Image (spheres, helix red, strand yellow):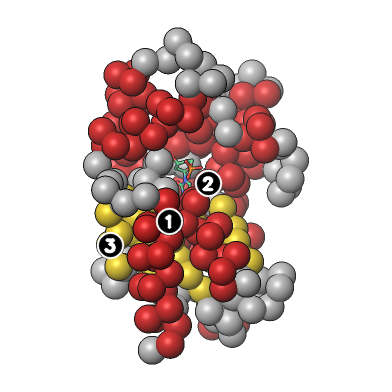
Amino acid sequence: MSPALRPATPVIAIDGTAASGKGTIARALARELKFDHLDTGALYRAVAALVLRAGGDPGSRHDALKACAGFCPGIVPEAELRSAAVGEAASQVAVLPEVRAALRDLQVRFAASPPGGRGAVIDGRDIGTVIAPEATAKLFVTAGIAERAHRRWREVQILDPAKTYETILAELRQRDARDAGRAAAPMRPAQDAILLDTTDLSIDAAVAAALEAVRGKLEA
Ligand code: DC
């Protein structure tokens, strides 16, 4: 982050694996602390959705960059962003350094000057390591893969009852491997991140644990 963009207000960086609960935790922390929340996965999902809409290939640099050129926040409706196909394609476009570079400024600016002026909670895969390495508090949220697959399976039951637990488990394994294995800004805990394993925690307990950890840093 350039010195000019050093945040004047606190930044809470929340990274972690898919279906770990990091998004739910980030929203709850933002509500509780009255900070603004940025879901950076939604940015990669929007680029991916634009590629798919155009009939392109999310693994193609050319198609992904064309989508980046047409991207602006809010351009893709929430329901479209949340589809499994868009999530998978998001993980593919996120491998490309040029896509990451195109989305970087918006994230760094949000960290430096959140719209409400009190502080920012930003969730993603590289927030504590790349976007806001000087964040006030960093959490890395994960959970065992079987538990994450169960959570996803319960979520998709209504929309896609034919989708099996085994398929979801295989998709999550592939997603973890791609997100953590890419060369550009791979998913990994920052050295100074607090690790939060939500495998055996209810949503309320996970939020309470995250809030306690973050308050400790905000008050330090
Ligand atoms: O958090 P999510 O499932 O909405 O993210 C979708 C994909 O976007 C994820 O598999 C990897 C990518 N992503 C990323 O590479 N960096 C981020 N900061 C956020 C998401």
Whole-number angstrom distance, CA of label 1 to CA of label 2: 23 Å
Task: Residue 134: tell me if it is visible.
Answer: no
The quadrant the C terminus occupies is bottom left
Disc 3 packing (10 Å; few <14; some 14–19; many ≥20): some
Q: Residue furthest bottom?
A: 220
Circle 1: residue type = Asp
Q: Which mark is residue 204?
A: 1
- Name the secondary structure under disc 1: helix
- Name the secondary structure under disc 3: strand
Disc 1 packing (10 Å; few <14; some 14–19; many ≥20): few
Q: Which mark is residue 41?
A: 2
Disc 2 residue: CB within 8 Å of ligand 1? yes
Observer-side mark, 2 or 3, equals: 3
Relative to 143, residue 57 above or below: above
Q: Assess whether mark 3 and mark 2 are in contact (beta carbons under 8 angstroms).
A: no
Disc 1 residue: CB within 8 Å of ligand 1? no
Circle 3: residue type = Leu
**Which residue is located at x 58 percent, y 82 percent?**
9
Q: Position of residue 96 (x, y in %)?
A: 46, 41
Observer-side mark, 1 or 3, equals: 1
Disc 3 residue: CB within 8 Å of ligand 1? no
Q: Which residue is mark 3?
A: 195
Whole-number angstrom distance, CA of label 1 to CA of label 3: 17 Å
Q: Earlier in the sequence, mark 1 or mark 3?
A: 3
